[in-house]
Image (cartoon, coloured by chain):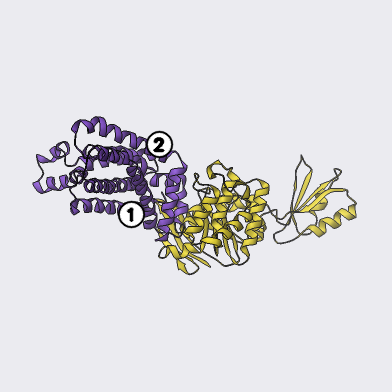
Chain colours: A yellow, B purple
Amino acid sequence: MIQISELTRKFGPFTAVNKVSFEVKPGEVLGFLGPNGAGKSTTMKMITGFLAPTAGHVKVMGQNVAKHPMNAQKQMGYLPEGAPSYGDMSVLKFLRFIGKIRGFSGDELDQRIHKVVDQVALSEVLNQRIETLSKGFKRRVGIAQAIIHDPQVLILDEPTDGLDPNQKHQVRELIRNLAKDKIVIISTHILEEVSAVCTRALIISAGNIVFDGTPVELAAKSKYHNAVSVKFSHPYEVKQKLESLVNVYRIDCEDESGLITVFPETGKSVLKQVNELIHIQDWEVEELHVEKGRLDDVFRQVTVGEVA
Amino acid sequence: MMGTGIIMRRELASYFTTPLAYIFIVIFLMMSGVFTFYLGRFFERGQADLISFFNFIPWLYLILVPAISMRLWSEERKSGTIELLMTLPVTVVQAVLGKFLAAWLFIGVALMLTFPVWVTVNYLGEPDNGVIFASYLGSWLMAGGFLAVGSCISATTKSQVVAFILTLVICFIFVAAGFPMVLDAFTEWAPLWLIDGISSLSFLTHFDAVSRGVIDLRDLLYFLIMTVCWLAATTVVINIKKAD
């Protein structure tokens, strides 16, 4: 369990994190979202004990991070922003170093290294110096060092930044598999990642929490949530007929693509009505789908107050 | 203190995976040779001792030790690995000590590799090897003092060049504190106890006796205390500035 209460960090006159409070329970994968400079990394640095808070405190598995940093750090794995590592070491030597610092030796150390190398697919570069590796490999070395001791709490600052789609998929799988009874906090810019791996999303903007809920709830904040998009094969006169349906709030027509979006009133659904109308009128349809909600819009809406 | 040992071994290994260690050792040996045999007039003196070698050691350290110490923390801060290191279950003291010990051992190795001068002097005459051993020990302790200063300066900046220059200047002040050029600035106005205090902080004053084989516990203590104080300062600086 991570308990964060009234956490504040100031840099001179600038308040990077402002009285942030939240809790994360085992089994949760918390997606930490926010624009650049919103205070995501600063918060993560305070959770891991790298940065001392100006006010407030962080407890990790019951340990106060400021008072007993070592006890808390033993239970945490951390991938700092940009995945820094010692470039002049080979991947194997670097992992051995981290493993030893984490208190492993002998056979156990070998087994642990073997396991993480397997988990993040590093075997082909094991004896290469880290500075010669591609961005994706460096990131995976960073993840490997964070999970080598099988920590209860895993803090990953932008774990998929710089990875190609296959590698992203792999890392997300890894996080999903790890997360069964653990606490995982990942920060990201990529909104699909939240739907893909997180059980909870937390959006921070200008040092304040502006959203805290499940990814589904986040999507539900979008005006596109439950909207029905239809593309007709022929230019029928549809607008008026659609508008007269029950629960319809508004119709949008995109001239170029011919895609028509039917927005329901808040909390209602229009799929059934639209579907029936299409059958009755015998319109030919090329495409029809229900929108889950556009996360980008919600993100903009909650972080800069722009209307989505 | 397991963390200290692990960090020390990692650091030591990293010296030898880059050309740094080899370049340092070659230059150290070449320069100490030049100083001893040309400037120190080792042969012309006709004495079976290594005074002409040890006399130049402080000046050699002055240039070469900052080159080792500059990367101790600046590099960690610049590359961001300090965030990794400081979130591992090790204390700041362990990290400071581990890094310092690695650098100190490394300089110890470089110092030991000057053994051909010792062989030469033993071949040519019958020197007092006890004196020579004591002088080697003193030189190594002094290297610790230089390194500890460098460690602290390196912790204050992300730039290795700034760390090098500042360390050089501060070490120079310490080396030359007993010289007229430093003391003259004080003699006009300062009370005698202050002037004595400043000159007693000089590396040279303390090393001079050591290089002649006079082992005074106070001289050795001076270098040890110097080292401990500057390492303590490093710990404070790291705690304050690590996340900047």
Q: Quick check: B173 left or right of A169? A: left
Which class describes the residues within 10 Å of circle 2: few (<14), some (14-19), or many (20+)?
few
Q: Earlier in the sequence, mark 2 or mark 1?
A: 2
Amino acid at pointer 1: Val
Residue A162, position in %: x, y? 60, 45
Asked whether the viewer can see residue B132, the reply is yes
- Return the x and y of residue B158 as percentages of the image width and height: 40, 43
Location of mark 2 (residue): B23
Q: Horizontal and vertical percent for residue A197?
A: 65, 58
Q: Residue B162 appears in which quarter of the rendering?
A: top left
Task: Give above or below for A27 relative to A187.
Answer: below
Say which chain tag 1 marks: B
Res B236 label: 1
SS at circle 1: helix
Residue sitting at 64 percent across and 57 percent down?
A174
Q: Does dot 2 land on a helix, a strand or a loop?
A: helix
Question: Extreme bottom residue here?
Answer: A62
Relative side of A295 to B222, left or right: right
> Which mark's residue is nearer the viewer, 2 or 1?
2
Q: How many marks?
A: 2
Q: Residue at x 30, y 54 (%)?
A: B232
Q: Amino acid at mark 2?
A: Ile
Mark 1: few, some, or many residues within 10 Å (few <14, many ≥20)? some
